[in-house]
Image: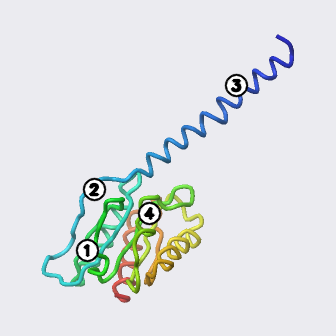
Amino acid sequence: MGVIGIILLILFYFLTYIIILPAGAGSVVVSILDREKNIPAETIGSNDSTEQIYMVYHPGMSKFTTKVLRGLAENITQNNYKVTLYSAGKDLQINLTDARAIGLASPIYAGFIRPPLENFIQRNEFSGIKCFVVLTGGDKGNMDVETAKVAKLIEEKGGKIIGKEKFITSDKEDELQAKIDLFSKELIEKL
């Protein structure tokens, strides 16, 4: 085997183990993240409440997004609202006009919301419905850009954005709760 053969062999191993295999593993991880989750709807608040808020979300790989939504829901229900959390999926069929407002939530991975939530937004009409955006992620990064992109998707489908916020997994518990409380208060004022 000559010098060229050795160089080609090294190049082959480099491409295989340094570039191709990690890229393939990364695409497997992303496809796992993007799977629809079969989570039953969860209603928070009194059945006596006549005003309904829907929160449609994709939970991602952790329980953080769900934790944030439950915190928001607990605060909102203290103002005579009933909140129902729905996991986004192709089979989710809800009458959006039954809700006073709709929250749309997703973790951000690689700068994008999860496809099940994006697909839900694309296949529904939000004409005149008050909507809010909740994003979760590991860092503050492009927070304004990410929330603006999701808000634009909703506005293109006729939704009226009343709030948008991104919650960071690294926030201390008391900081996270304070942010949830503040965002809840802002939403309630706009309902």
* Label 3 to label 2: alpha-carbon separation: 43 Å
The quarter of the picture where the C terminus appears is bottom left
Query: Which amino acid type corresponds to the residue marked 2 in the rendered image?
Result: Ile
Mark toward the viewer: 1 or 2: 2
User: First in sequence: mark 3 or mark 2?
Assistant: 3
Mark toward the viewer: 4 or 3: 4
- Which residue has dot 1 on it? 83
Query: Which amino acid type corresponds to the residue marked 3 in the rendered image?
Result: Tyr
User: Tag 4: Cα neighbours inside 10 Å, few (<14), some, or many (≥20)?
Assistant: few
**Looking at the image, which residue is at 42% across and 73% down?**
179
Find out whether the residues at labels 4 and 2 contact each other: C-beta distance under 8 Å.
no
User: First in sequence: mark 4 or mark 1?
Assistant: 1
Tell me the element at label 4: helix
* Label 1 to label 2: alpha-carbon separation: 16 Å
Q: Which mark is residue 13?
A: 3
**Where is residue 111 shown, x and y percent of the image?**
56, 60
User: Tag 1: Cα neighbours inside 10 Å, few (<14), some, or many (≥20)?
Assistant: many
- Which residue has dot 2 on it? 39
* Label 4 to label 2: alpha-carbon separation: 17 Å
Query: Which amino acid type corresponds to the residue marked 1 in the rendered image?
Result: Val
Tell me the element at label 2: loop
Tell me the element at label 1: strand
Find out whether the residues at labels 3 and 2 contact each other: C-beta distance under 8 Å.
no
User: First in sequence: mark 1 or mark 3?
Assistant: 3
- Which residue has dot 4 on it? 119
**Looking at the image, which residue is at 47% across and 63% down?**
168
Tell me the element at label 3: helix
* Label 4 to label 1: alpha-carbon separation: 22 Å
User: First in sequence: mark 4 or mark 3?
Assistant: 3
User: First in sequence: mark 1 or mark 2?
Assistant: 2
